[in-house]
Amino acid sequence: MQTRVFIVHMLPARAARFFARASATGMMTEGYVWIVTDNVGTSLDVLPEHTIETMQGVVSFRPYVAKSVRTTDFTARFVTQFIAKYHQYTDVRMARPTVYQYWAYDVACAVAIATEKLKRVRFSNLGFQTLEGEGKRLLDGLVPTPAGPKLLRSILEAEFDGLAGRFRLVDRHLQIPIYEVVNLIGEKARGIGFWSPGSGLLRLLNSSNCQSGAICSMSTGKALKPVIWPGDSITVPKGWDFPVNGKILRIGVPVRREFKFFVNVENNPNTNTSSISGYSIDVFDAAVKKLPYALRYQYIPYDCANSYELLVSQVFFKNLDAAVGDVTIVANRTRYVDFTMPYTESGVSMLVLAKNDGKLSTWIFLEPLTKGLWIVTLLFLFATGLLVWLIEHPTNVEFQGSKLRQFSTVFYFTFSTLTFSHDQIIKKLRSKVLVVIWCFVVLVLVQTYTASLSSLLTARRLQPSVTDPWQLLRNGDCVGYQNGSFVQARLKQIGFGEHKIKVFSTLEQYANALRAGSKHGGVSAIFDEVPYLNSFLTQYGQEFKIVGPVDRTNGFGFVFPKGSPMVPDLSKAILNLREGSEGLEIENKWFGDATLPLHHDNPDTDFAHLTLRSFKGLFIINGITLGVTLLITLPKFIRARNTEPINASSQSAFESGETASNNEPEPLPDGTAEDSAPAESPPE
């Protein structure tokens, strides 16, 4: 049998003979697990030595009796009296009391307590009479006492601290609150933990779980102490092993001429054996290791001439027990066999030649940002410039002069912030804070715009030559498929004529046909399943592109006969494999460190344009800053305009584009103006 875990429920004497047989047949060795119930567990410490030797490594349960002063005193007295009465037994182990002796003592105490209680309350002459000549069969000769029902009720209601713990009967059964888990090592059962209905398995007991009068330790963890299994092994057995006479499954694998990534069969003529490897083989082997039972199998190479229908039929007719390989899950095949869940990607796509398209749109530099984002950016740009002008105009000569000069200064300053080339012409703190925040927004916009434009230019240059199978039909192009694939029927359903469909068997034929093109004896596209196309790209790289999927399939699966119980188990194992790191390691082993991504129908549509939502937070912060600054600046600007005296000379100078000097000379006493020019004039 493949089973290596056994639970024994016997009386101690019968269990002793049973384990002697198990030891003689080699079943008490490493890899086996033996668990005995409390029938045997309570007697482990008093079994004979020759029996203990055949039960090493056994795990058992027994009612827990905490050590106390009372139990120590009882054990000493019990051993002394037992040896005195049964001195002919030289095995000291049999003189030790078990939980049965503790229970017998507690039951006797319960009867005595009940009897004393009845004597004090009602019955002063309580006793039992026996018939004459019935001393040898005391129980049969007992005469019922009138106090029997009262005595029984009193016993059932008794509750006290006994040797074995708290004595309490529920439905006439003694309650056992805690069991001890023991491991038989050497001459005694070693405690490895405890079990209780409320707490489950515990390494050590908490003080709240201890019985009164017991000495208990605090719990330090949920896990049990290490178990020493049969054969002195500390390794946890897996619970099963390969059966000696179990059936070996005959699993067929297809002999491939190409696409040997999935199944590769190499024959050795010297030894007349076959070496089988591949991605599908590794996945199946790894999934079998995750099964909770043994599965013995051998791979049988089957040359199906690239027709997987023949391989599937061999499983249906019971010539093979299963089939492992790159077998696609197709609805028609599920009528005869069962498939596990797919272990690869699904779908049929087109493999086409990539073209380097150098034609770029004249306005491609506008495409990284959406129209809304462009508009909002320009609005904030002008708003920032206008607010800077409001702050700086009353006191900063750089923002004064003719209207044309003021507009050009503001226009140049605001747009120069986009390239961070603006001059340090602002003086006010409010203007500097406003410009710093705006420059931060511009920094984020410029960096993301640059990255997006680079990505867009690259994507536009590497375009597939064909993006739609209907385009091939309209142009009358030839297409190809893999020899033996069901894709041929799919192409005919789409509308391709027989003379427009070509069959290929090797990866080199794929590449040469696509390079030649439909007009020169080749094809414009090859239709195949995604796993095959990904394996093709691992060798031929970016010269070709995958477009699709153009049809839906369920991927590759393992084939088993209808109703096979291994299908759901293997499906769960495959699911665990794909979700974990082991599945990724197998994939990287055969297809490289990274799976090549699919290229969809139109690479332009895959490009993610930058929208206003992407920078919503930045514009909110900048907008709040603009609003607060405007509320502070606008009243001051209006007040300055209303109170500032403007004389004729300054007005004339303002209109002519000249600015007054900060060091304007004092007027002469005679009221005539000084003819000399100002010592310093601001630059135009």
Image (cartoon, rainbow, N blue to C red):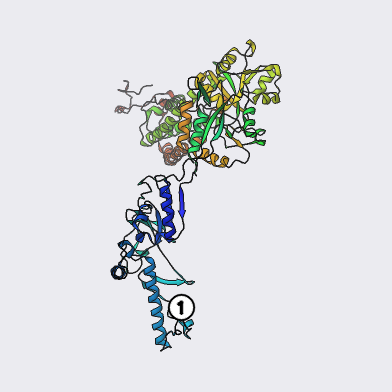
- Where residue 529 appears, x then y in whole percent? 59, 27
Which residue is rendered at x = 47% and y = 44% of the image? 240
Q: In the rendered image, is residue 177 in sight?
A: yes
Find numbered disc 1 in the image and state the secondary structure of the residue it sits on. loop
Which residue is rendered at x = 44% and y = 44% of the image? 238
Instruction: Please rate how many residues cluster around mark 1, counting C-alpha atoms within 10 Å: few if below 14, some from 14 to 19, many from 20.
Output: few
The answer to whether residue 424 is above or below residue 166 is above
- Furthest residue toward top: 520
- Where residue 655 appears, x then y in whole percent? 44, 25
* 515 horizontally vs 151: left or right: right
Which residue is rendered at x = 42% and y = 72% of the image? 168
Q: Quadrant of residue 423?
A: top left
The answer to whether residue 278 is above or below residue 461 is below
- Where residue 581 appears, x then y in whole percent? 45, 36
* 421 horizontally vs 527: left or right: left
- Where residue 104 appears, x then y in whole percent? 39, 71
Q: Nearer the viewer, residue 428 or 574?
A: 574
Q: In the rendered image, is residue 205 in sight?
A: no
- What amino acid does circle 1 point to? Leu
Q: Quadrant of residue 554?
A: top right
Q: Quadrant of residue 561?
A: top right
Q: Nearer the viewer, residue 614 or 469?
A: 469
Q: Nearer the viewer, residue 138 or 474?
A: 138
Q: How many marks?
A: 1
Which residue is rendered at x = 46% and y = 53% of the image? 7
Check disc 1 and report the residue beneath it. 139
Quadrant (top left/top right/bottom left/bottom right) for the C terminus: top left
